[in-house]
Amino acid sequence: MSTLEDISALLQKGKANETKANVEKAIAEGIDARTILEEGLMAGMNIIGGKFKRNEVYVPEVLIAARAMNAGLLPLKPLLVSAGVKATGVVVIGTVKGDLHDIGKNLVKMMMEGKGLEVHDIGVDSAGDKFVQAAKEFKADIVACSALLTTTMNEMKGVVEALKAAGLRDKLTVMVGGAPVTDSFCKSIGADLYSPDAASAAEAAVSACQKSA
Ligand code: B1M
């Protein structure tokens, strides 16, 4: 197996130290940073994303693969910055006001990062103004809201309204998701995209960024 294939396979197994060591090996072999990112780390994460979508792997496997991805990114980040590799889009993600559930949101974030998006996580219990502030600060292409409670999903409407009041609504894509959220709810609150799971959310985010580019 080539070093890039090793990186992908080790990432899928969640072997953080070995993934990082093989990224360092690939750099020493003279493979460029973008290729290591796309054909090693992201290739592995895409495979995990597909398996997660098909229920062939579960939350723990995704979390340890994401940890390996983060470990592999460490030696790569300075090279990517100096090579001027730009993120494919900027996302601000958070769990809405009153809601403390963050496992699903964290998975969405990891999958998005695995697709090369720059993701800024504003955490849990985030009101509309916090999303607005972060969207302005990071010049977001996408605002992504997660909610796990039927009592908090309506806060997503508050985020849409806050973006409207700040004059940002038409300049970015609003994505929503979480167990109680549906496509019709998404439409009813004036959001743009609903995704049922983390892998679909990452794919939808990339295609939204490509359309707006
Ligand atoms: Co809570 N909780 N919880 N909880 N909790 C649920 C959600 C619940 C369904 C359990 C139940 O009653 N059966 C229920 C909600 C009922 C309802 O509203 N219909 C519930 C409740 C009631 C509560 C409390 C009110 C309990 C209480 O105190 N009486 C309380 C609320 C606290 C608050 O938020 N204010 C509470 C607290 C907690 C804990 C803190 C103990 C803990 C959260 C820990 C944490 O997140 N750090 C917790 C947990 C763990 C759960 C369950 C067991 C698991 C949730 C989870 O992490 N699932 C949950 C029951 C269940 O789901 N079986 C439950 C795994 C995760 C990967 O899935 O988050 O759905 P999920 O994310 C998926 C998709 O939804 C999607 O992608 C993810 C991966 O594919 N997705 C997105 C998520 N966000 C997305 C965003 C997107 C796109 C896709 O685009 C932007």
Image (spheres, grey):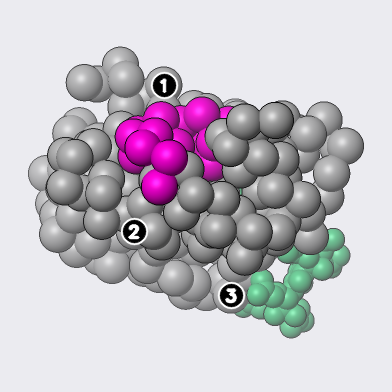
Q: Residue at x 60, y 54 (%)?
A: 19
Tell me: 52 left or right of 195: right
Disc 1 target residue: 207
Q: Is residue 25 visible?
A: yes
Q: Secondary structure at mark 1?
A: helix
Dominant SS type (magenta): helix
Q: Is mark 3 within 8 Å of ligand 1?
A: yes
183 w.r.t. 166: above or below? above
**Residue contact between numbered discs 1 and 2, judged by CB atoms under 8 Å:** no
Q: Secondary structure at mark 3?
A: loop
Amino acid type, mark 3: Leu
Ligand 1 quadrant? bottom right
Closer to the camera in the image, 118 or 13: 13
Mark 1 and mark 2 lie on one chain; the one further toward the N terminus is: 2
Visible residue check, residue 163? no
**What residue is disc 2 on?**
120
Separation (CA) of disc 3 from disc 2: 17 Å
From the top left corner, tell me how far across and down residue 209 is, in percent: 32, 27
Say which quarter of the image contains residue 153.
bottom right
Residue plotted at (78% across, 34% down): 51
Residue 69: x percent and y percent? 55, 53
> Circle 2 — which element?
strand
Give the CA separation, mark 1 to mark 3.
29 Å
Query: In which quadrant of the rendered image does the N terminus lie?
Result: top right
Categorize mark 3 by other alpha carbons within 10 Å: few (<14), some (14-19), many (20+): some
Tag of residue 100 = 3
**Badge 2 amino acid:** His
User: Which residues lie in the magenta part?
Assistant: 28-43
